[in-house]
Image (spheres, grey):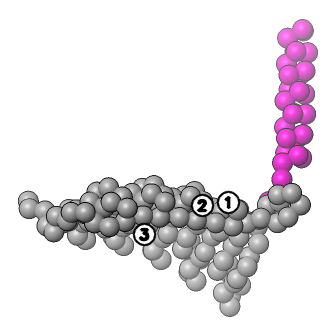
Amino acid sequence: MRQVYFLRFCFAVVFVFLACFTACSPATKEVVEEAYPDGSPRLVRVYGEKNGARVLLQERQYYQNKQIRMEGSFKEDERDGKWVYYFENGNIWSEGSFREGKSDGKRITYYENGNKRYEGKYSNGNRVGVWKFYDEEGKLVKEEDYQEGTPSSTEESINP
């Protein structure tokens, strides 16, 4: 019997904690900023509140066929975090990260058939390191080594 009361007590504590947590967390509001003539969303933004002011948190754009076109997050009105762009058929076109509005981290771009087009890394908005480029069938065709956004050496073609 004691175990039943203990379990009820634990459940009540967890319930109160969750209720307080969700009530105290800032509310987000999804707003359709632009729509197509048929009323379907073209641009949707998610806003939150910080220090009494409305702040942009996320953005999604859609094709007219209602397929998602791109999505990503913001921090202090600048792109921040993962951003993904899509082809109209739903396949990923490009994915990468931003920090303080600048490309930062791994970037991969694809052909519409799903094969990689190129991949590499950004640092503070500049291409860095080795970038690999592929043909539409997925074969590696070129590599470029970047130093602060400028290619330092180029391998024009990769031999089989």
**Which residue sits at x=42%, y=56%?**
106
Residue furthest top as drawn = 2
Task: Give SS at disc 3.
Answer: strand
- Tag nearer the camera, 3 or 1: 1
Q: How many marks?
A: 3
Q: Position of residue 118 (x, y in %)?
A: 32, 65
Query: From the viewer's perspective, is residue 102 above or below residue 24?
Result: below
Task: Give SS at disc 1.
Answer: strand
Q: Position of residue 137 (x, y in %)?
A: 22, 67
**Which residue sits at x=84%, y=30%?**
14
Query: From the viewer's perspective, is residue 36 above or below residue 138?
Result: below
Query: From the viewer's perspective, is residue 154 above or below residue 69?
Result: above
Query: From the viewer's perspective, is residue 15 above or below residue 93?
Result: above
The numbered dot on residue 75 is: 1
- List the residue tagged with mark 3: 93
Q: Is residue 22 left or right of residue 32?
A: right
Q: Position of residue 153 (x, y in %)?
A: 21, 63
For marks 2 and 1, give the CA distance.
7 Å
Q: Earlier in the sequence, mark 2 or mark 3?
A: 3
Quadrant in which the N terminus appears:
top right
Q: Is residue 150 magenta?
A: no
Mark 3 neighbour density, 10 Å: few (under 14) some (14–19) many (20 or more): many
Examine the image and state in which quarter residue 147 appears: bottom left
Residue furthest bottom as drawn = 37
Q: Are marks 2 and 1 in contact (CB under 8 Å)?
A: yes
Q: Is residue 25 magenta?
A: yes
- List the residue tagged with mark 2: 100
Tell me the kind of residue under disc 2.
Answer: Glu
Tell me the kind of residue under disc 3.
Answer: Trp
Q: Nearer the viewer, residue 67 or 73?
A: 73
Res. 38 visible in picture: yes
**Which range of residues does the magenta coloring cover?**
1-28
